[in-house]
Image (tube, grey):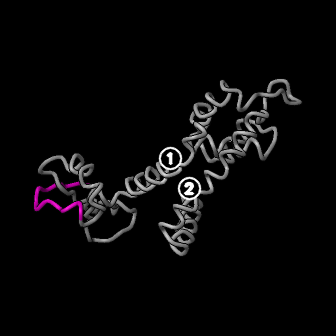
Amino acid sequence: MVRTCSSGTTPNPASAVPASTAVALSSVYLGAYTHCTFAQASDGDSLTGMSGPAPIRLSPAECTCFRMRGAARRVTQIYSRHLAPTGLKISQFSLLGFVAARGPVSITELSELLSTDRTTLTRNLRPLLSSGIIERAAAGDRRRHELVATTAGRALFKRALPLWVAAEQEVRAAMGAKLTTDLHGALDRSMEKLAAL
């Protein structure tokens, strides 16, 4: 793949993304290198894996990861604000909910349920274990331990649940029913397609 960069007219970040993200983008553009052209290489390879003579022009604002992480950060802020009285982060709330609902569950099973890696899961589990919200219980196999919600953990989840509902309602009200449904469908389909990569 051949990549050529030019210093033509600087794209206006505000035209592609909300004004609130324009400041963040300014540090990405790196001075005169305002946009890059990814030209098709001689072997037919291109940025998208599709053949064709037309070069592909991209700006940082068009990065799929950038957009998804930005949306995730904003949504996380809303849920965190609602859950603040419980001291739970949204990631810990989801974790506690699965453990409380599923009963004894192994870390491997929980990792699959939450679609997260074991390292991240272990980090999120640590404060819940140290505070007695979740505990380890010996399973039938002595080499394996399962996680269960304690009485205190179940009480905390019960207290946090209506706060989570309020956060969910705020997000849905802001986006509207159709956009919310479309977003859920798009995310589900995206996860299915990306799972094979």
Q: Is residue 179 left or right of residue 146?
A: left
Where is mark 1, residue-wise?
81
Name the foreground residue: 55 vs 118.
118
Instruction: Identify the mark at residue 40; answer none if there is no mark.
Output: none
Which stretch did the figure color magenta? 1-14
Residue at (66% x, 24% y) in the render:
130
Residue at (81% x, 38% y) in the render:
104
Mark 1 vs mark 2: which is more N-terminal? 1
Q: Are marks 1 and 2 in contact (CB under 8 Å)?
A: yes
- Circle 2 sits in a helix, a strand or a loop, which is it? helix
Q: Position of residue 2 (x, y in %)?
A: 25, 55
Question: 10 Å neighbourhood of mark 2: few (<14), some, or many (≥20)?
Answer: many
* 88 vs 130: above or below: below
Residue type at numbered disc 2: Ala
* 170 vs 119: above or below: below
Name the foreground residue: 62 vs 56.
62
Q: Is residue 40 left or right of residue 161?
A: left
Instruction: Identify the mark at residue 167; answer none if there is no mark.
Output: 2
Q: Is residue 134 left or right of residue 116?
A: right
Q: Is residue 6 magenta?
A: yes
Residue at (13% x, 56% y) in the render:
6
Q: Position of residue 53 (x, y in %)?
A: 27, 71
Q: How many marks?
A: 2
Q: Position of residue 5 (x, y in %)?
A: 17, 54
Q: Is residue 150 left or right of residue 161?
A: right
- Which quarter shows the N terminus? bottom left
Question: 10 Å neighbourhood of mark 1: few (<14), some, or many (≥20)?
Answer: some
- Circle 1 sits in a helix, a strand or a loop, which is it? helix
Residue type at numbered disc 1: Arg
Name the foreground residue: 192 vs 68.
68
Between the residue at mark 1 and the residue at mark 2, the CA separation in whole angstroms equals 8 Å
Q: Is residue 136 magenta?
A: no
